[in-house]
Image: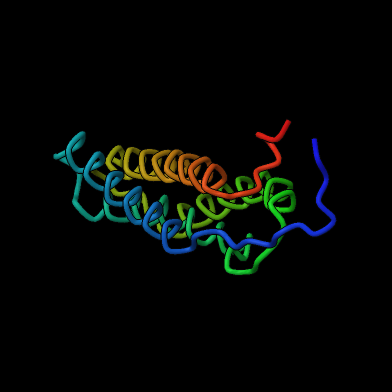
Amino acid sequence: MTQNSHQEAVSLPVTAMIVAGVVGGGMGFFAGWLAHTGDPLALAVRGSVAGGGGYLLGSLVLMPWIARPVEHWMAIWPGALLSRLLATGIMAWLLYFRPPEGDDGFRTALVVSHVVSIFLDAALLARWSRSLDQNPVHES
């Protein structure tokens, strides 16, 4: 592997990360509403807000708008995943009020929105890292 004396600093695509959270929240709402049509609609909304919003709030820990070397991004990424999980849990706790009818729509929307956001995020990171001119993983 060749070493460059100057590593280019890059920032993460913030807009694409926001879109991943919004799309994940939307898919979570749709899954929660579709899977449990007997539950109140507000439960699916709360679950999708907790899942997608937790992903977005947890992403703020990364401060993706600041330019850093690629190696730094890869080093802090596991911490960002943990912060997203914690933010999602906290938001779910804050938004959850157990209704007498059941909470399956909330749980389905929460899980689907969080998982979809994380999968979109992983795809985003892979695409972003491949688009860089200097990708240390692919150098020989």
Q: Examine the rendered structure and indicate whether residue 1 appears above or below residue 53.
A: above
Determine the residue positioned at 65% across, 34% down. Answer: 138
Residue positioned 57% across, 50% down in the render? 132
Q: Quadrant of the C terminus?
A: top right
Q: Position of residue 8 (x, y in %)?
A: 70, 60
* Outermost residue to the left: 37
1 relative to 55, above or below: above
**Which residue ends up furthest to the top in the rendered image?**
140
Residue at (63% x, 61% y) in the render: 10
Front residue (pair 126, 23): 126
Q: How is the image coloured?
A: rainbow
For residue 4, side relative to residue 134 (left or right): right
Give the quadrant of residue 32.
top left
- Residue 6, how many percent across, how many down? 80, 59
Find residue 16 and report its image quarter. bottom left
Give the number of callouts: 0
Tell which of 80 and 2 is nearer to you: 2
Residue 22 in the image, given as x and y percentages of width and height: 34, 56
